[in-house]
Amino acid sequence: MSFDQHGRTIDYLRISVTDRCNLRCLYCMPEEGVPSKSHDSMLSLEEIASFARIAAGEGFKRIRLTGGEPLVRLGIEELVTKLRAIPGVESIAMTTNGILLPKMAKKLKEAGLSRVNISLDTLDPDQYHHITRWGNIKEVHRGIDTALELGFRPVKINVVVVRSLDQDLLAFVRMSLDRPLHVRFIEYMPVGGSLGNEGLGWTKEDTIPNEELIALINQKTQEGGLGALEPLSQQSETPTGWGPARYYQLKGAKGTVGFISALSRHFCSECNRMRLTVDGQLLPCLFSNTSYDVKAALRSQDLDAVGQVLRKALASKPSEHHHKVGTEHYMSQIGG
């Protein structure tokens, strides 16, 4: 196992395979996209797999592929196959906007992908088009259907909650009733504000603390005749996961409702992750500009040097983010 200087077990590696995306979500990247990186500046699939092998040797057991949108990376199925073959890697997951899943999910499943998180911040088609700048929500619903049909478990729906968007939260909760969908409400985090995200019109006042959100949803579910959300305290009752969500369930529901409170009730003491960016930077913390370059070590084919960089990054992992939320990077460049 890998431990940081604060005694936390660090065994979860999030790998951004691209900073490109087929959408332009308002809080994630500018309308024109992020500045293009040269092919040589990005890690190759083999370099990503090589780093993952070294990380697995250090005790990392779980890998999540992120972006941008990971499904736009050419050869993503091949990468999943390479990662699944690494001794010590127990599970591979992906966070996606779901649009390309109907076309690609079967091959990904065969390659060894077992879990998907699908980002969806509204169920209103017009609002979805506004948030994503051009997305079609019907394509996301087809992606969700495909993931369930192919047996991905669990299938989680990630919902970033923004006060000024006036999202239909009850409609999201209802998604957990009849199908094994696990809806997670995530506090809005103004990452990347230093690059202009303040232009969205969203501010720190748009973050709805989870306690307020739970009370609001309980009011809506009871008014709708669904009863109150019941907390799930037993690990066996919650969907398998590697993160900090607190889970609830409506009586008789096949799925669950989770809450991730990155700001109001931060979970730094339970943090178990490191992040690798597509250009080979290892990030000890989401809310920090500190990074460690592993690309040079990988390209020198000095595996000992790669391990040294990983251990150095692990040793520098802060105890908490101290309420710092802005970084020099957009979320699409970090990988979430």
Image (cartoon, rainbow, N blue to C red):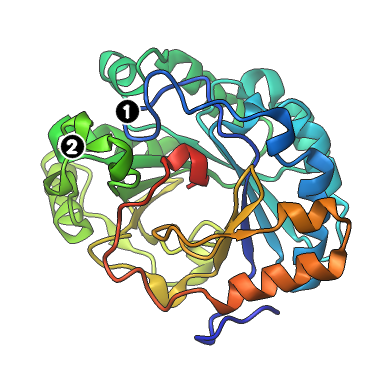
In primary-sequence order, the first of circles 2 and 1 is 1
Which residue is rendered at x = 68% and y = 37% of the image?
41
Three-letter amino acid code at the position of disc 1? Leu
Residue 288: where, in percent of width, then height?
Answer: 41, 61
* Mark 2, other Cα within 10 Å: few <14 / some 14–19 / many ≥20: some
Q: Nearer the viewer, residue 112 or 53?
A: 53
Q: CA–CA distance between discs 2 and 1?
A: 10 Å
Please identify the quadrant where the N terminus is shown: bottom right
Three-letter amino acid code at the position of disc 2? Trp
Is residue 10 visible in the rendered structure shown here? no
At mark 2, the secondary structure is loop
Q: Nearer the viewer, residue 143 or 85?
A: 85
Q: Tell me whether the residue at label 2 lies in contact with that at label 1, contact meaning CB atoms closer than 8 angstroms.
A: yes
Q: Nearer the viewer, residue 238 or 199?
A: 199
* Mark 1, other Cα within 10 Å: few <14 / some 14–19 / many ≥20: some
Label annotation for residue 170: none
At mark 1, the secondary structure is loop
Residue corresponding to mark 1: 26
Q: Nearer the viewer, residue 158 or 153?
A: 158
Is residue 243 visible in the rendered structure shown here? yes
Label annotation for residue 202: 2
Residue 332: where, in percent of width, then height?
Answer: 48, 37
Residue 265's image quarter? bottom left
Residue 153: where, in percent of width, then height?
Answer: 62, 46
Residue 9: where, in percent of width, then height?
Answer: 59, 78
Q: Is residue 203 above or below residue 292?
A: above
Which residue is rendered at x = 17% and y = 50% of the image?
208
Q: Is residue 233 above or below residue 13?
A: below
Left or right of residue 89, residue 168 in this image: left
Which residue is rendered at x = 32% and y = 67% of the image?
266
Which residue is rendered at x = 64% and y = 47% of the image?
93
Residue 146's image quarter? top right
